[in-house]
Image (cartoon, rainbow, N blue to C red):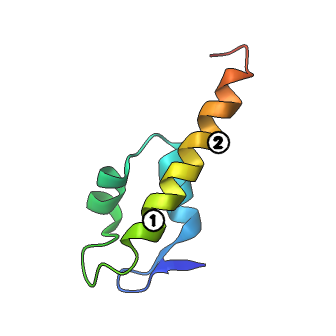
Amino acid sequence: MYVCLCKAVTQQQIRQAAADGASYADIRKELGVGTDCGCCGQCAKQIVRETSTTAVAACEFSEAC
């Protein structure tokens, strides 16, 4: 699903970047999310939060961490 229509950025692109350790500021800089009309900013931030929380929870149960 497209999150940012202005820059044609999808939910999956944001999730992947966040899973790779990018912050919202990093994603904004790299993908341009929230830099035109700004309507997608809150949604993108929420996706980053959800992805980061999931990654931390998964790490807590992994012996590799």
The quadrant in which residue 45 appears is bottom left
- Could you say which disc has been placed on residue 44 in the image? 1
Q: Nearer the viewer, residue 46 or 11?
A: 46
Other-residue count near label 1 (Cα within 10 Å), few / some / many at <14 / 14–19 / ≥20 = many
Q: Going by the image, does 2 lie left or right of 39? A: right
Considering the numbered disc 2 on the image, is that residue within a helix, a strand or a loop?
helix
Residue 3 location, x and y as percent? 49, 77
User: Residue at coordinates 53% horizontally, 59% vertically from top-left?
Assistant: 47
Considering the numbered disc 1 on the image, is that residue within a helix, a strand or a loop?
helix
Q: Is residue 11 above or below residue 23?
A: below
User: Residue at coordinates 36% horizontally, 57% vertically from top-left?
Assistant: 27
Q: Is residue 30 above or below residue 33?
A: above
> Are circles 1 and 2 on residues that touch, CB within 8 Å?
no
User: Residue at coordinates 35% horizontally, 65% vertically from top-left?
Assistant: 31
Q: Is residue 19 above or below residue 65?
A: below
Amino acid type at mark 1 = Ala
Separation of residues labelled 1 and 2 (CA atoms) = 15 Å
Which quadrant does the C terminus fall into?
top right
Q: Nearer the viewer, residue 50 or 18?
A: 50
Residue 41 location, x and y as percent? 37, 70
Name the residue tied to disc 2. Answer: 54
Other-residue count near label 2 (Cα within 10 Å), few / some / many at <14 / 14–19 / ≥20 = few
Q: Going by the image, does 53 lie left or right of 48? A: right
Residue 56 location, x and y as percent? 60, 32
Amino acid type at mark 2 = Thr
